[in-house]
């Protein structure tokens, strides 16, 4: 019994160490995303915003006070929501520029898949200069 307890104690210590490492890696990943010098937004398949970064919130103030779970179509114009939806459906989108608050905005969408299942998309947004 004592040997089993020691074995369980060692397994528990290893598990705690693994959790600490994964937590550190996740935090670093979040910090890297937050500080990227491009405007990035993560959206799930249902069109709900999951995560934004600092640059997006600065460049597009409409995102500054949105909570995770807010639908993208509640924030961007219909044309922007359409770019996202068409891109996720696998359609080639050549007209990824739309007007928003007096500016031309380009939205690039990179679908996110896990084990062949579509989970959402990464949106990269930028204001175009004439």
Image: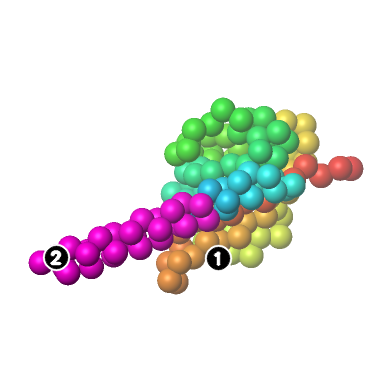
Instruction: Decide if residue 66 is in sight here.
Output: yes
Near mark 2 (Cα within 10 A), the count class, few <14, some 14-19 or many ≥20, is few
Earlier residue among tags 1 and 2: 2
Q: Are marks 1 and 2 in contact (CB under 8 Å)?
A: no
Q: Is residue 116 left or right of residue 129?
A: left
Marks 1/2: CA–CA distance? 58 Å
**Front-most of 97 and 45?**
45
Question: What SS does tag 2 mark?
Answer: helix
Give the side of residue 17 with respect to residue 85, left or right: left
Q: Residue at x 51, y 52 (%)?
A: 24
Q: Quadrant of the C terminus?
A: top right
Q: Is residue 35 magenta?
A: no
Q: Which residue is mark 2?
A: 2
Q: In the image, is residue 42 above or below residue 75?
A: below
Q: Magenta includes 17? A: yes
Picture coordinates of residue 90 (x, y %)?
55, 65
User: Residue at left 58%, top 51%?
Assistant: 28
Q: Nearer the viewer, mark 1 or mark 2?
A: 2
Q: Is residue 77 above or below residue 25?
A: above
Residue sitting at 29 percent across and 59 percent down?
12
Q: Quadrant of the N terminus?
A: bottom left
Residue, far bottom: 116
Using the image, tell me which numbered label, if any, was put on residue 90: 1
Residue 78 drawn at (x, y percent):
59, 40
Whether residue 28 sits left or right of residue 114 in the image: it is right
Please provide the residue range marked out in magenta: 1-25
């Amino acid at each position: 019994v004592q040997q089993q307890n020691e074995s369980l104690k060692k397994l528990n210590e290893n598990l705690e160490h693994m959790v600490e490492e994964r937590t550190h890696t996740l935090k670093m990943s979040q910090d890297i995303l937050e500080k990227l010098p491009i405007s990035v937004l993560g959206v799930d398949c249902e069109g709900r915003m999951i995560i934004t970064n600092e640059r997006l919130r600065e460049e597009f103030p409409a995102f500054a006070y949105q909570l995770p779970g807010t639908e993208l179509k509640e924030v961007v114009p219909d044309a922007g929501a359409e770019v996202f939806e068409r891109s996720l459906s696998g359609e080639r989108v050549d007209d990824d520029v739309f007007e928003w608050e007096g500016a031309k905005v380009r939205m690039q969408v990179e679908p996110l898949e896990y084990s062949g299942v579509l989970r959402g998309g990464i949106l990269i947004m930028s204001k175009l200069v004439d």
